[in-house]
Image: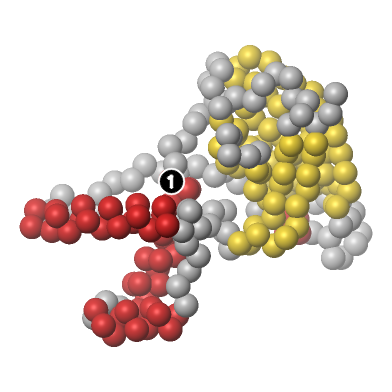
Amino acid sequence: MMMKRMPFTPPTEHYDERVLPIDKQICLLLQQRKEISEGNPGYPPFAYIDQWSAETGLYEDFLKILFGTLRSDEYFKPIVEPADFRRHLPVLVSQEHEGYFFTLTSVRQYANASVVTLYVDWDVTIPEQTSTGISNFVLHMGEHYDCRMDRGGSCSGNATYNYVVSPALPDRLSGLEFVFREEIGGPFGGEPTGKEVRFDIEE
């Protein structure tokens, strides 16, 4: 699994310049909406969407998709691709969480970013333990770092996930906290389930 975005191609070359002032106002309102909600607007109740549809004549399903898309704007941040490899930093800290064994193995250091590797192991003889139990874990490292899953994959009994962190982490990792929070509802714009695995790096 790779969390990459394909380049966007305009669906048409046509643009009615008469709607330009309206489109600009839409962008300003979206910015205002994000600021007021502090980046977490949630999703309008369907009753509101039904009312807005009746008042404006816009299709309900269109509005539902529109507000769903507005929740995922963080996904469209410019992607930092690691460049100019510098070194590997061994970590090797582990913990068990609800029958799954999580290991933060290493950090690859680049000039502009870091790549964090997480391994997960579980007992395949236990029916309740499957790869679906550890999917969509999102890395959080505080407001100073942007984290995204770069790639991942799983097979019977184990899984591997790589996360790109920018800017690059310091070579001295002590004092840093790696928090992996489970989310449902897709690779972006998901809802936290409350499950989290936390690694505090000490001396």
With 35 as the anchor, is 26 left or right in this view?
Answer: left
Q: Quadrant of residue 148?
A: top right
With 25 as the anchor, is 192 left or right in this view?
Answer: right
Q: What number of labels is visible?
A: 1
Residue at 54 percent across and 44 percent down: it is: 3
With 132 as the anchor, is 12 left or right in this view?
Answer: left
Q: Provide residue 35's location: percent of width, then percent of height.
A: 41, 52
* Residue reaching furthest to the front: 36
Q: Pointer 1: what residue?
A: 76
With 166 as the anchor, is 198 left or right in this view?
Answer: right
Q: How is the image coloured?
A: secondary structure
Q: Residues within 10 Å of mark 1 (few under 14, many from 20)?
A: few
Q: Indicate the quadrant containing the C terminus: top left, top right, bottom left or bottom right.
A: top right
Q: Provide residue 7's location: percent of width, then percent of height.
A: 36, 42
Q: Provide residue 24's location: percent of width, then percent of height.
A: 21, 52
Residue at 54 percent across and 22 percent down: it is: 112
Compare residues 183 and 100 and report the one nearer the observer. Answer: 183
Q: Is mark 1 on a helix, strand or loop?
A: helix
Q: In this view, does 45 lie above or below 111?
A: below
Q: Provide residue 72's location: percent of width, then percent of height.
A: 47, 55
- Can residue 150 be seen from the camera position used here? no
Residue at 40 percent across and 72 percent down: it is: 64
Residue at 42 percent across and 60 percent down: it is: 69
- Can residue 146 be seen from the camera position used here? yes
Task: Report the amino acid beneath label 1.
Answer: Phe
